[in-house]
C-alpha cells in the first residue's frame, strides 16, 4: 500500500509542531513559544488505523523575514510540492501577531491548489481566547477550503482529527503497474551485470521489485549476470566466449517461444543492442521500468526529452540528476559514462554538465538555466518526489529524459524504439 504524504504548514507559532505531536501521539517536534522553533523539515512515518500508512512532515513557519526566513520558506514549499495532503494550521488567536494579514496562508493555499493538493485548514483553537480578536474564516472564503476547528494541544483530540481526515480525504493514488502487460508462464530475462559498486547480499531495488512483481504474477524470471568487461573486451576470443554464453541461454529460453521480455541494466545497452540486433526479442531497461512506474506512467515525457538532446549546442547547460549518492567507481553511469558520451558527441567540454544527487534538486529558478535534465531511474525516491520534479520541470518548460532512454538512444533511434515499444511508444 502506498504511503500518503501529509505536510503541515503555516506561520511561525501557529501550532504546526503541536499538530505533528498530536498526530504521532509523541513529543517528536519541539514545541515552544519562541517563533521559529522548527527550523527545518521534520519527517516521520507511521500508520493511522483505518487511514493507512503515512509520511508526516512538520515544517518551519513561512513568514520569517531575512535570508534565512526565505530559505525556510523554500524548503517548506518544496515539501508542500511532494505532499498529497496539505494541513494549513492557523492559530485563531494570532490576529494581533499577524496584524490581520493572511497573505502567508493565501500563498500556501494558492500553491496547494495550483499543484492540486488536498488541502484542509486546521484552525488551532486556544483556550482562554476571550477578549481577543479571533481569526475570521471569511477572509479565506474565496478559496472554498474545508476546515476543522480543534484545540491541538489536547491529546484526546487525536481521534477528532483522524475522523475528520478519514471522512474528508478523497486522495486516490493512480495505480500504475510496474511493468507493461505480460503473460503468465513465459520467461522474463533479467540482465544484471554486477560490478564493484554492487552491494553484497542483495539485489538492487529495481531488480528486487521486478523479480518479486513477476514471480507474484506467475511469470518466471531468469536472472543472468553478464560480464561487461569480457563483453566489451578488445580480445575477440574473450568477447566471443561471453557472447556465446549469453546466446546459449537466449536460444534455450526462446525454444517453444518461452521468452517474452529481456530487461537489462541500461549501462549494458551497447552490448544488448549489438548482440540481439537480429533476434526477435522485446527489450527494455531497469531504468525505464522504474521511471515509468515512479512517474505514474509518464515515460512519454522522458522520451520526448530526446528532441532536446538532439538540439543541444555548444555552451548549453544540462543537469544529470541521480536519486541517491551511491559509491562511485571508474565506470559510473551518471558521472562518467553519460558525460563521456556527451563529450564524444558534442566535443569535449562543449556542454556544461551539473550533477545533483539524492534529494537535492535545482531550485525552481535555477532549473530554467538548463536545456535538459537527465534523470536516473529514481528507485530511491518516492512517487511524490518524482511527480513534484516533473511538475517543476513542466512549469519551467525544461525538457527531461532518463538514463535508460538516453543510453538506448546512444545505440541509435531503432534501439530506443525497441526499449519503449513494450510501453506502446515510438519516436520518429
Ligand atoms: N494554550 C495553547 N497553546 C498552544 C496551543 N497550540 C500551540 N500552543 C502553543 O503555541 C506555541 C507554538 O506552538 P508550536 O506547535 O511550537 O508552533 P509552530 O507552528 O510549530 O511554531 P514554529 O516551529 O516556531 O513555526 C507553543 O508555546 C505551544 O505550546 C493550544 O491549543 N493552546
Ligand atoms: S536512485 Fe537513481 S542513481 Fe540511485 S540506485 Fe536508484 S536509479 Fe541508481
Ligand atoms: Mg514548529
Image (spheres, helix red, strand yellow):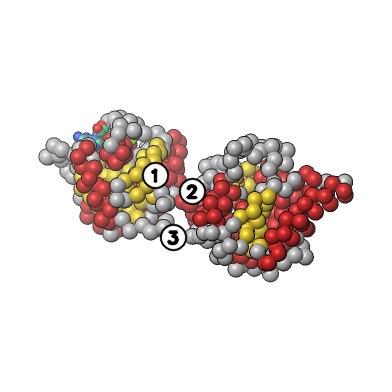
Q: Quadrant of residue 21?
A: top left
For marks 1 and 3 on the same chain, the one whose residue lies earlier in the sequence: 1
Numbered mark located on residue 382 in the image = 2
Q: Which residue is mark 1?
A: 55
Q: For the point 59% across and 37% down, which residue is it?
A: 201
Quadrant for residue 99, please give it: top left
**In the structure shown, which secondary structural element does the residue marked by tag 1 occupy?**
strand
Q: Are marks 2 and 1 in contact (CB under 8 Å)?
A: yes
Label whose residue precedes the other's in the sequence (2 or 1): 1
Does the image show residue 102?
A: no
Give the residue drawn at x 54%, y 55%: 215
Between 420 and 356, the one lying in front of the other is 420
357 sits left or right of 254 in the view: left
Left or right side of 83 for 133: left
Q: Is residue 281 visible?
A: yes
Left/right placement of residue 414 relative to residue 12 reads right
Instruction: Tell me the SS state at disc 3.
Output: loop
Answer above or below: position of 99 versus 116.
above
Q: Among all residues in the image, which is located at the extreme right?
A: 236
Q: If you read the primary sequence from the N terminus, does the residue marked by circle 2 or circle 3 appear first?
A: 3
The disc at residue 174 is 3
* Local SS, label 2: loop
Q: Quadrant of ligand 3?
A: top left
| Residue density around tag 2, few if under 14, some if 14–19, many if 20 or more, within 10 Å | some
Amino acid at each position: 500500500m502506498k504511503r500518503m504524504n501529509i505536510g503541515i504548514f503555516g506561520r511561525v507559532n501557529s501550532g504546526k509542531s503541536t499538530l505533528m505531536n498530536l498526530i504521532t501521539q509523541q513529543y517528536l517536534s519541539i514545541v515552544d513559544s519562541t517563533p521559529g522553533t522548527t527550523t527545518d523539515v521534520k519527517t516521520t512515518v507511521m500508520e493511522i488505523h483505518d487511514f493507512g500508512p503515512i509520511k508526516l512532515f512538520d515544517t518551519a513557519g513561512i513568514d520569517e523575514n531575512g535570508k534565512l526566513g526565505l530559505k525556510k520558506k523554500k524548503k517548506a514549499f518544496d515539501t508542500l510540492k511532494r505532499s498529497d495532503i496539505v494541513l494549513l494550521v492557523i492559530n485563531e488567536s494570532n490576529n494581533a501577531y499577524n496584524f490581520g494579514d493572511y497573505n502567508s496562508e493565501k500563498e500556501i493555499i494558492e500553491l496547494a491548489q495550483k499543484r492540486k493538493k488536498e488541502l484542509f485548514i486546521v484552525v488551532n483553537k486556544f483556550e482562554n481566547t476571550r477578549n481577543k480578536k479571533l481569526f475570521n474564516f471569511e477572509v479565506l472564503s474565496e478559496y472554498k477550503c474545508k476546515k476543522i476547528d480543534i484545540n491541538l494541544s489536547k491529546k484526546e483530540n487525536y481521534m477528532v482529527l483522524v475522523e475528520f481526515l478519514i471522512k474528508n480525504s478523497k486522495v486516490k493514488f493512480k495505480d500504475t503497474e510496474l511493468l507493461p502487460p505480460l503473460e503468465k508462464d513465459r520467461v522474463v530475462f533479467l540482465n544484471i551485470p554486477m560490478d564493484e559498486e554492487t552491494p553484497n547480499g542483495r539485489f538492487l531495488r529495481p531488480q528486487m521489485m521486478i523479480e518479486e512483481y513477476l514471480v507474484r504474477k506467475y511469470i518466471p524470471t531468469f536472472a543472468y549476470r553478464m560480464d561487461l568487461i569480457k563483453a566489451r573486451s578488445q580480445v575477440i576470443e574473450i568477447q566471443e566466449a561471453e557472447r556465446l554464453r549469453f546466446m546459449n541461454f537466449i536460444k534455450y529460453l526462446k525454444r517453444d517461444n518461452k521468452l517474452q521480455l529481456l530487461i537489462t541494466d541500461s549501462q549494458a545497452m551497447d552490448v544488448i543492442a549489438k548482440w540481439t540486433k537480429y533476434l526477435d526479442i522485446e527489450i527494455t531497461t531497469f531504468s525505464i521500468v522504474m521511471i515509468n512506474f515512479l512517474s505514474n506512467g509518464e515515460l512519454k515525457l522522458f522520451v520526448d526529452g530526446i528532441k532536446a538532446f538532439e538540439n543541444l549546442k555548444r555552451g548549453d547547460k544540462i543537469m544529470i540528476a541521480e536519486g541517491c549518492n551511491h559509491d562511485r567507481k571508474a565506470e559510473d553511469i551518471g558521472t562518467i559514462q553519460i558525460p563521456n558520451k556527451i563529450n564524444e558527441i558534442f566535443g569535449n567540454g562543449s556542454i556544461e554538465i551539473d550533477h545533483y544527487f539524492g534529494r537535492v534538486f535545482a531550485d525552481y529558478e535555477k532549473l530554467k538555466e538548463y536545456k535538459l535534465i537527465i534523470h536516473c531511474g529514481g528507485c530511491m525516491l518516492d512517487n511524490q518526489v518524482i511527480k513534484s520534479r516533473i511538475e517543476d520541470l513542466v512549469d519551467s518548460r525544461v525538457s527531461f529524459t532518463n538514463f535508460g532512454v538516453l543510453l538506448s538512444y546512444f545505440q541509435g533511434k531503432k534501439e530506443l524504439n525497441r526499449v519503449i515499444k513494450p510501453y506502446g511508444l515510438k519516436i520518429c
